[in-house]
Amino acid sequence: MIRLTNVCKDYPTRVGMRRVLDSINVTVQPGEHLGILGRNGAGKSTLVRLISGAEAPTLGTIERNMAVSWPLAFSGGFQGSLTGADNVRFICRIYGVDYQPRFEFVKDFSELGIYLNEPVATYSSGMRARLAFAISMTIDFDCYLIDEVMAVGDQRFRERCRVELFEKRRDKAMLIVSHSHRYLKNVCDRFLLIEGGRLEDHNDFDEVYFRYKQLIGEGFESREDMVAAMDASTPEAQLRRERKRLRRLAANAGE
Amino acid sequence: MHSNSSQPPTGALVHHSPWEINRRVISALFLREMLTRYGRNNIGFLWLFVEPMLFTLVVVGIRSVTRSIYEGTIPMVAFAVTGWPSAMLWRNMPSRCMGALKSNRSLLHHRQVRIVDIYITRILLEQMATTTSFIVVSLILFAAGWLMPPEDVLKVIGGWLLLGWFGAGLALILGPLSERYEFVAHFWRPTMYIFLPLSGVAFVVDALPHSLQSIAMWFPMLNAIEYLRDGWFGSLFHAHYDIGYVVTFNLCLTFAGLSLVRQVGLGPSEE
């Protein structure tokens, strides 16, 4: 369980301290999947950093009775002059786990081949993301922090990440920051909306997404409109529309 | 679909005692830092010895020409070899620790890595690098027949440790301060160049005029170098030092440093 009690976080600005998170309370139970929504700069990543322990709260307490991951696919921790293998070795060392089986796994999953022995500085951003995700999967956590992870890699890699994370580790707790509604809706069972430093706890996706859309100024007239629009944007719906258009074209050509 | 036959065994996150975790984290950081700095080819490591060697030779050269300070009773090689590495010892640690957190901040996402670990790693690495170079240079000069072995090895070690402690304390203060105030790093360089000659690299206290001696004794690193030199060639000059003062000074530095390290963890971070 992770419990945040009256947590505040201030950041200094030119016009004095700004309170990004204002006495928020939230509890994450084992196995729960939480989606975090909010405008840019609302404090989503700050919340993730507080929970990961990379930053201390200004006020309040954070209890962790679970092993919490670093933000997934997070590649900021790589030392550019070290090789991919060196970085795997480093992670294994600080977590006190065997290197060899994990290195095999990373080699297998990241498909970086000989590049694992080259400095990370020479990697493309896609390669770096693949390495980062693969390394994240070598340590077992009770709770995974996922900050816009699925935006990386090609289709095939994304699919493999999905299997690794949401199928093999579906029983683990997850905190997911994403702007992708399809992704959140499919994966999460609880949602947090951050607005004005406050946290809104929602259990219904359509409800929270309606609120979120209102906040970012793309509001729908009603929830029904929004659900219809979202359904219309699914791949299936797009395919239906495309078929219809082609049929119409064919019919016109036939005339 | 891709097969994952090599999936590592689960339940990997072993819970150890705090001491065990600290030890593991620091050794991992240490190896990482060493690879980053010296690389895989050992030529980078060589400069560690070449630089103090060169300095020692230059000082010996100049002194054998001028031969003015202290009527030439002090063996010049021993004087130089105890001067430059000693100054490097307390000078390099703060330099390495300034901005260390900024470049390693992302490591704090790993729960077991604490800010103080980052500083300890850099201090240890610097300590070991300078110590190694001190020993190697001394051995080379000894083998060449230019340097007499120390009269009292324990005193030499004691002086060296006191200097290292002083450097570590200074690093723990300047590291966090440089994180919070940008000017600290800019001021450090000129300040250091003022303090470097005052720290006894190029003189012994006894050679100073009496009026200056009491002022010079306020510098803790000067006390420590005098102690170290007393151990090496104490029978040839009159050493001035107050070990109690150095220890007290170091204790205060360490205490202030550790509390600053704590504070910097509570402050905001940029990423």
Image (cartoon, grey):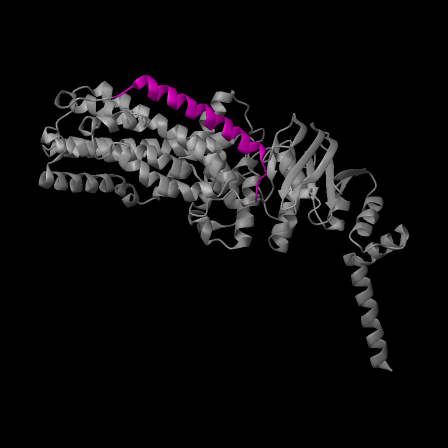
Q: How many marks?
A: 0
Residue B46: horizontal and vertical position, in percent?
A: 26, 42
Q: Is residue B241 left or right of residue A145?
A: left
Residue B129: horizontal and vertical position, in percent?
A: 31, 34
Q: In this rendered view, identify the residue nearer to me: B196 or A76.
A: B196
Residue B134: horizontal and vertical position, in percent?
A: 24, 32
Q: Residue at x 53, y 52 (%)?
A: A127
Considering every residue shown, the one lying at the far bottom of the view is A255
Q: Residue at x 43, y 39 (%)?
A: B98
For the C terminus of chain B, the image quarter is top right
Q: Is residue A135 left or right of residue B129?
A: right
Q: In this rendered view, identify the residue nearer to me: A175 or A161.
A: A175
Residue A79: horizontal and vertical position, in percent?
A: 46, 44
Q: Which secondary structure is most common in the magenta stretch?
A: helix
Q: Is residue B259 magenta?
A: yes
Q: Is residue B79 magenta?
A: no
Q: Is residue A168 visible?
A: no
Q: In this rendered view, identify the residue nearer to me: B83 or A119.
A: B83
Q: In this rendered view, identify the residue nearer to me: B59 or A67.
A: B59
Q: Is residue B174 left or right of residue B162?
A: right
Res B159 quadrant in image = top left
Q: Find the magenta span and give its range.
A: B241-270
Q: Is residue B21 visible?
A: yes
Above or below, A235 relative to A8: below
Res A229 quadrant in image = bottom right
Q: Is residue A173 left or right of residue A207?
A: left
Q: Residue at x 77, y 38 (%)?
A: A199
Considering every residue shown, the one lying at the far top of the view is B244
